[in-house]
Amino acid sequence: MAGDRRADAMDRLRYAPILEACRNAPRTRRELAEATDVSRTTVYRMTVALADQEYVERTADGYRTTTRGEAFGRLAETFLEGIEAIDRLDPLFEVISHPDLLDHAHTLTDPTVTTVDATDPYRVADRAIERFEAAHDPRGVVSSASPTGLLEDAREIVDTKDRIEWLFAERALAAHDAVGGEAFLDALEAPHLSIGVVPDEAVPFTFSVDRDDVSVSGHDPTSGLPTVIVESDSPAAWAWLDGRFRSLQKRATPLNAWLGR
């Protein structure tokens, strides 16, 4: 975006509170100043600019957001929500820097972020198990090995589900196989499980998709313990990760074929 256009876009973002305040009903300039905590002088300047751009229209009862203005207001709201989300995702950025996350991090709006610390190194692992246990239609992708205890907890939950779709990066499946052996692989062959294996480079991070929300996890490269999990019920984040899962699923090799069985 050219410099002038960028500056113009930033100016317009400052108008968002005015557009929101008169979205549902006309407001006088005095009412707009009270609703937005903006000076009447600034409100005057903003309403003139917004009217010139046809974002608001002046009626007998005050200023009201136009359809064009409402479309921009919704875009501005989405942009500001994305900024707030990114500001809260530092623990995730510390362990994941893949472009796919960076391109879509803004969609993880109103995130719940859980991290580990010295007093509770298993906090994130416990939260991941809680999510798996509560999931209605669990599907997800595993990018790295999990510690034995986490595997055992997950194994107890597997049989309670009607359907599970799960993909493993090659390195993750090999590491789990080394830890769990034949018992682990046999458990993955349950009829209600759909397990696939995808190339390592295709799986930059662990994530899960449920009926109404998603999660993204980052792991300690040495222990395999998850150190951060971010959860969001944003429809945009759901669409991103569901699409990512479906794309990987098309590339996946079924477990038995990968094992040469």
Image (cartoon, rainbow, N blue to C red):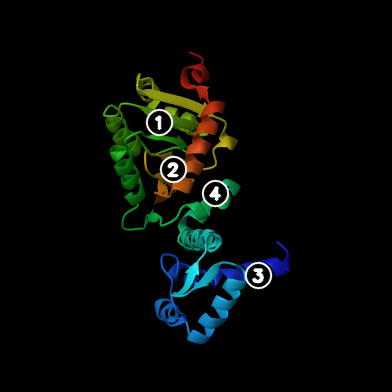
Q: Earlier in the sequence, mark 3 or mark 2?
A: 3
Residue 220 visible in rendering: no
Is disc 2 surrounded by few (<14), some (14 to 19) or many (20+) residues within 10 Å? Answer: some
Q: Give the structural element (helix, strand or loop) at label 4.
A: helix
Residue 61 visible in rendering: yes
Q: Give the Cα distance between marks 4 and 3.
A: 28 Å
| Residue bearing the label numbered 1 | 179
Mark seen at residue 101: 4
| Residue bearing the label numbered 3 | 8
Q: Position of residue 177 (x, y in %)?
A: 43, 27
Task: Locate residue 135: give its quadrant.
Answer: top left
| Residue bearing the label numbered 2 | 224
Task: Locate residue 10: give its quadrant.
Answer: bottom right
Q: Residue furthest top?
A: 261
Q: Earlier in the sequence, mark 1 or mark 4?
A: 4
> 102 or 226, which is in the foreground?
102
Q: Is residue 173 left or right of residue 189?
A: right
> Label 1 sits on what residue type?
Val
Q: Give the structural element (helix, strand or loop) at label 3.
A: helix
Residue at 48% in and 85% down: 39
Q: Give the Cα distance between marks 2 and 1.
A: 12 Å
- Camera-nearest label, 3 or 2: 3
